[in-house]
Image (cartoon, coloured by chain):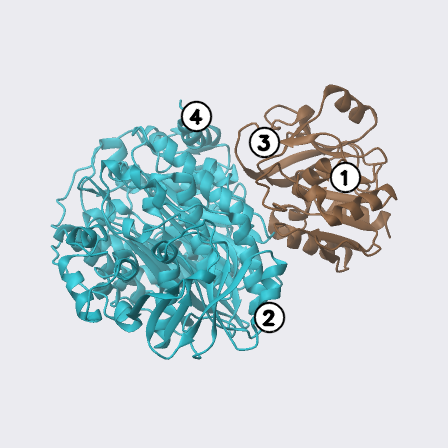
């Protein structure tokens, strides 16, 4: 078969990239080889537009055992244990087929984590949908949520947190970002670097079918109206097989059999074999006749590019093959020696005794194109006037708005209790799971504020990082590290590239200022349909440590007669706020700046007071500002409050950063300590009664708040 | 009390159950693999929650025919107490050890939240740690927990004191609102004729430690441990 320019183009390679392929090979590739270059050099696998900028992120620290570049990041949490985590997008497949797209997103991120030798102990997800009025939105929400639940619930990993927002910019490109955290012994981490020429290359898990061929290439292009024809590129998930694969891999990892292991995710057998060989500076020879297949007549091209789920590739130590085989047979999974590690540095594939591919591994992985794409800085947003509104009425409208309304309808469909270690359930600032056999806990959160990022990418990038740090701090956790999921539009457009550059720059500042490195991540570009890009959405997954879970606090008011303190400075910033959008219908203005020094000072103070036992409840202030945060604390605890505050929109609804609300029975001590620490703090009210009461006596009952807050999503989903 | 917890490939709440049993009885239970056809002599057999063999077919339908279930049936016939929680309850129904069936929830969705249960009969080996009429709070986590049986069977269950738990409000009233999965007569758990087999959808094992938000499930395990000591 002759490779025509049309075939090259349909594989997503530019003429220049194809010329590079010809240079590397010194001849024309065959179709299998072209397919392999195509997926390895896709945006999804090569990070070719973002790599130059991602290198600027801080990725090291005293606790970092493994940073970006492996299947997941690894952080030391003491006592010989490590937290292993990563976030990954499954945006394009979830738009085309929401249930399977979201389900396999969960499956993929779970594999990334247990591949490293960790037992998954928590899942989170960050979801963004189009406008609630868009005809597809309800169907997408229902499918995505059912898919995430269907997979995670069956596998038996609790889904403990997440976020869900709506905006017309996601009408044609929803975002489904899934995060998994696992627990491993710090000295038993498994990596993907191949070693030992002659060692067996072993395929385990489910069989290979024709599903998901070219998924990575699909994820590297814009959508158009006919994208639904790409449904065959979406994979189908089988959580039961995943559960078996987790148990079998972890059982094998108890021994010393494994030299290297890699899951078959995007670009399946291609990326796993090329990446493993590439990292080891070695070659791999595979006999494709030995690959367990689900269908007859599969071509080498199909076998290499299939994205069938629940599969792993391993390199085993000599002599350990039979013991390994027995474990996989016990779990009724396929186990096949499909090839050997070689010294040639080439990927050689055979089928029916013939060589169907023979390419150098190094260039495919190391010489993947890297682009320094042109970018435009974002013009500064104009200042904006905020209207005044009756505060109780505004509060009611905010709490019942799609972004602030309760997401209980979603997280009650996720098993967030399985494993029996969930200490803080979804719905608060950060969730918390205990580490079995200890008093320690892992805290986790995902967050991003895209309306800030679109108004000022740098401020928005910094804010996203800082907000996760604040969420973790608000339960008493010490923030350790982050994973990032950078969702943007088409990087070939300079204004989109400007958003990417700006957000990463802001993230960098915040990570450095907060000693909060990036240990893993994922980039999803080309989130555009018919030229309409999504809002820049760099989702941050933050992980923190609690030494004693009984010291952690929740957002719920604990009882009457406690003092409510506001920590941090309030200037009344309403630019790019939810108040401005929901009350005035304006998406305008600059986002609130984050003073990272104040962030750290305020957060360290709050954490210290929580751990000292002086704080009974804590909540950070974010979307909707002070009054929304107080209402959330009141609803969670079913206790009202009487407030002593200025009733200006800026004070009540401004979104100034680095702020927390605390309740305490020792206000004098807390205020004195805040003053000593140079942290602004003031009394804003007292808990008690069944209503929120503002100065002047205007009030709303907690029952009514809850009714407004809890009803929007269920009503929307049932078509009301 | 010596307990055995049966583990299917897709069980996923077996560690919750093993932890709860050990926490309350002080003894490590045995873990028995589904492919084993031998079951050591024990005082209590537990079938935990999960998705036994994936449950792509009707929940528990395949597990009911596994080698280990033949042994479980023989033990049940000999009077060994059997506890099935969630998927375990589904398996016991499919295996014919308990009457009725668990349909998909009325909402057609997975449910994960705390429920209130009223103890309907405390005169059994499983419920002696509670008093009749006591209300406890424990979580549920299932998609197929909507208990169904024909009216004659339901009448017989009620007449024979074989309803173990009902979904109720916090103050003990069996309302429609409290019965979110749509179970017949708010039934959350039932006994067999001899009250030596109990199946229930909620998870008492996940309410046995203060960090879990409720310790109301302790009564079940403490009662069992005392009765089977």
- Identify the residue at the far front of this view: A353
* Foreground residue among A95 and B13: A95
Q: Which residue is mark 1?
A: B198
As helix, strand or loop, the secondary structure at mark 1 comes to: strand
- Identify the residue at the far top of this view: B151
Separation of marks 2 and 1 at Cα, in angstroms: 42 Å
Left or right of A93, for residue B68: right
Q: Which residue is mark 2?
A: A322
Separation of marks 1 and 4 at Cα, in angstroms: 36 Å
User: At which x and y percent is residue A599?
Assistant: 32, 59
User: At which x and y percent is residue B68?
Assistant: 75, 49
Q: Which residue is mark 3?
A: B104
The quadrant of the rendering that contains the C terminus of chain A is top left
Q: Colour of chain A?
A: cyan
The quadrant of the rendering that contains the N terminus of chain A is bottom left
Left or right of B68, for residue A282: left
Q: Chain of mark 4?
A: A
Q: Residue at x 14, y 58 (%)?
A: A15
Q: Chain of mark 2?
A: A
Q: Is residue A468 visible?
A: no
Q: Residue at x 40, y 73 (%)?
A: A193
Chain shown in brown: B
Q: Residue at x 54, y 62 (%)?
A: A335
User: At which x and y percent is residue B65?
Assistant: 71, 43
Please tell me the numbered disc located at residue A718.
Answer: 4
Closer to the camera: disc 2 or disc 4? Answer: 2
């Amino acid at each position: 078969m002759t490779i025509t320019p049309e075939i090259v183009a349909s594989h997503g390679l530019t003429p220049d990239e194809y010329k590079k392929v010809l240079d590397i090979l010194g001849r024309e590739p065959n179709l299998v080889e072209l397919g392999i270059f195509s997926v390895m050099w896709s945006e999804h696998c090569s990070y070719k537009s973002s790599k130059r900028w991602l290198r600027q992120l801080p990725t090291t620290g005293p606790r970092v055992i493994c940073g970006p570049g492996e299947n997941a990041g690894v952080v030391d949490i003491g006592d010989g244990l490590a937290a292993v985590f990563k976030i990954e997008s499954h945006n394009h497949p979830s738009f085309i087929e929401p249930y399977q797209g979201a389900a396999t997103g969960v499956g993929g991120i779970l594999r990334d984590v247990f591949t490293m030798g960790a037992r998954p102990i928590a899942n989170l997800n960050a979801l963004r949908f189009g406008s609630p009025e868009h005809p597809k939105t309800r169907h997408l929400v229902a499918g995505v949520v059912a898919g995430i639940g269907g997979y995670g619930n069956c596998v038996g990993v609790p889904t403990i947190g997440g976020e869900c927002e709506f905006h017309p910019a996601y009408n044609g490109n929803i975002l489904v970002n899934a995060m998994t955290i696992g627990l491993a012994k710090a000295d038993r981490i498994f990596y993907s670097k191949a070693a030992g020429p002659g060692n067996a290359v072993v395929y385990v898990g489910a069989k290979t079918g024709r599903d998901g061929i070219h998924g990575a290439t699909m994820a590297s292009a814009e959508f158009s109206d006919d994208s639904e024809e790409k449904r065959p590129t979406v994979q189908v998930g089988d959580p039961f097989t995943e559960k078996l694969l987790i148990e079998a891999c972890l059982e094998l990892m108890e021994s010393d059999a494994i030299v290297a292991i890699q899951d078959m995710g995007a670009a399946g057998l291609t990326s796993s074999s090329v990446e493993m060989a590439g990292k080891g500076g070695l070659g791999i020879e595979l006999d494709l006749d030995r690959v367990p297949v689900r269908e007859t007549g599969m071509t080498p091209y199909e076998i290499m590019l299939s994205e069938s789920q629940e599969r792993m590739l391993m390199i085993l130590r000599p002599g350990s093959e039979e013991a390994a085989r027995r474990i996989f047979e016990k779990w009724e999974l396929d186990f096949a020696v499909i090839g050997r590690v070689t010294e040639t540095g080439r990927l050689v594939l055979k089928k029916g005794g013939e060589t169907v591919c023979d390419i150098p591994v190094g260039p495919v992985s190391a010489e993947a194109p890297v682009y320094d794409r042109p970018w435009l800085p974002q013009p500064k947003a104009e200042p904006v006037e905020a209207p005044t509104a009756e505060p109780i009425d505004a509060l009611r409208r905010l709490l019942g708005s799609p972004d602030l309304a309760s997401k209980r309808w979603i997280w009650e469909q996720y098993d967030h209790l399985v494993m029996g270690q969930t200490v803080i359930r979804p719905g608060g600032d950060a969730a918390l799971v205990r580490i079995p056999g200890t008093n320690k806990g892992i805290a986790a959160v995902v967050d991003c504020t895209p309306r800030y990022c679109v108004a000022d990418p740098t401020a928005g990038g910094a804010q996203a990082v800082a907000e996760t740090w604040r969420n973790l701090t608000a339960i008493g956790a010490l923030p350790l590290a982050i994973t990032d999921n950078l969702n943007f539009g088409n990087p070939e457009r300079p204004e989109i590239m400007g958003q990417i550059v700006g957000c990463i720059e802001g993230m960098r500042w915040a990570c450095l200022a907060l000693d909060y490195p990036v240990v893993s991540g994922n980039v999803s570009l080309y989130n555009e349909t018919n030229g309409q890009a999504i809002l820049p959405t760099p989702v941050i997954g933050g992980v923190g440590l609690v030494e004693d879970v009984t010291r952690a606090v929740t957002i719920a008011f604990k009882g009457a007669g406690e003092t409510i303190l506001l920590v941090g400075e309030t200037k009344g910033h309403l630019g790019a706020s939810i108040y401005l959008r929901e009350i005035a219908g304006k998406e305008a203005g600059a986002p609130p700046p984050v003073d990272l020094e104040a962030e750290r000072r305020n957060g360290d103070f709050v954490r210290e007071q929580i751990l000292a036992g002086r704080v009974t409840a804590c909540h950070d202030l974010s979307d909707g500002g002070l009054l929304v945060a107080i209402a959330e604390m009141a609803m969670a605890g079913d206790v009202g409050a009487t407030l002593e505050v200025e009733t200006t929109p800026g004070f009540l609804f401004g979104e100034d950063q680095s702020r927390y609300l605390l309740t305490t029975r020792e206000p004098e001590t807390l205020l004195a300590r805040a003053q000593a620490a140079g942290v602004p703090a003031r009394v804003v009210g007292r808990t008690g009664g069944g209503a929120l009461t503002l100065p002047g006596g205007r009030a709303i009952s907690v029952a009514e708040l809850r009714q407004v807050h809890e009803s929007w999503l269920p009503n929307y989903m049932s078509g009301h | 009390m010596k307990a055995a917890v049966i583990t299917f490939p897709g069980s996923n709440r077996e560690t919750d159950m093993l932890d709860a049993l050990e926490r309350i009885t002080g003894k490590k239970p045995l873990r028995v693999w589904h492919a084993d056809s031998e079951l050591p002599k024990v005082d209590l057999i537990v079938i935990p929650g999960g998705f036994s063999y994936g449950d792509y077919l009707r929940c528990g339908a395949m597990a009911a025919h596994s080698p280990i279930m033949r042994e479980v049936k023989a033990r049940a016939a000999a009077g060994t107490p059997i506890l099935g929680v969630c998927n375990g309850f589904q398996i016991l129904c499919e295996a014919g050890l308990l009457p009725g069936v668990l349909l998909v929830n009325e909402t057609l969705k997975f449910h994960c939240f705390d429920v209130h249960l009223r103890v309907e009969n405390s005169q059994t080996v499983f419920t002696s740690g509670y008093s009749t009429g006591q209300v406890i709070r424990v979580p549920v986590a299932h998609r197929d927990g909507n208990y169904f049986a024909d009216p004659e069977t339901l009448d017989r269950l009620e007449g024979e004191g074989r309803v173990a738990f009902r979904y109720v409000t916090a103050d003990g009233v069996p309302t429609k609102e409290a019965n979110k999965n749509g179970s017949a007569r708010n039934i959350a758990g039932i006994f067999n004729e001899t009250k030596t087999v109990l199946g229930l959808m909620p998870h008492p094992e996940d309410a046995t430690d203060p960090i879990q938000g409720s310790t109301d499930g302790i009564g079940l395990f403490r009662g069992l441990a005392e009765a089977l000591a």
